[in-house]
Image (spheres, rainbow, N blue to C red):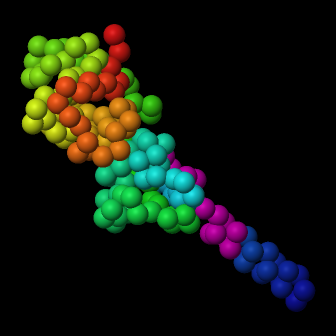
Amino acid sequence: MRKFLAVTLVMVVALLVLTAASPAPASAAGPAYYVVRYGDTLAGIAWRYGVSMWTLARYNGIWNPNLIYAGQVLVIPYIPGPWPPAPMPCPIPGPIPGPVYRCMYRVQYGDTMIRIAARLGTDPWTLARYNGIYNLNWIYAGQWLRIPNCYL
């Protein structure tokens, strides 16, 4: 009788431990985790998960987005919305101040990437990456910029 009771007790304890230790099903609203690999950039990781680079940096307490290292664990916040994002329609030249021709913008004297991006309804890093610009300050008057997510 003691053996039966001991075996039953062990089985009940094992059953309780297994059911208590099993993880809850992953919800779509929880954050994801990413381990940075050699050659990764914060902008690339943010693009892969559909969040902005600055949101990802702020969420992980990163002050300089250029200083991430291989092996670092990043928390990717869940941001509701469709993925991939729906393409934006091409902006209409009328209400946008500045020279917009089809899906191109001509930089004027005194323009900054931040102001141009705000006029076009995008963020400056997306605009820069789309045009192959690595420094937001390296634009010049007369330069043509392609507008991201603009389809004719």
In the image, residue 141 above or below residue 32: above
Question: Residue at 26% across / 42% down in the picture?
Answer: 138
Counting from the top left corner in percent of width and height, residue 124 is at: 26, 40
Relative to 26, is 11 on the left or the right? right
Tell me the quarter of the picture where residue 143 sits. Answer: top left
Instruction: Locate residue 130 relative to residue 6 in the image: left or right.
Output: left
Find residue 83 and report its horizontal and vertical position in percent: 44, 33
Label the magenta part by its dominant secondary structure. Answer: loop
Q: Which residue is at the front of the view, 84 or 46?
A: 46
Does residue 72 appear to the left or right of 125 in the view shown?
right
18 horizontally vs 137: left or right: right
| Visible residue check, residue 59 | no
Q: Residue at x 55, y 64 (%)?
A: 70
Q: Is residue 64 above or below residue 42?
A: below
Residue located at (72% from left, 78% from top): 13
Specify the quadrant of the image occupied by residue 19.
Answer: bottom right
Q: Residue at x 56, y 66 (%)?
A: 71
Which quadrant of the figure contains the N terminus?
Answer: bottom right
Q: Extreme bottom residue here?
A: 2
Q: Which residues are magenta?
A: 16-30
Residue 44 is situated, as x and y percent measured from the top left of the image, at 46, 46
Residue 61 location, x and y as percent?
Answer: 34, 66
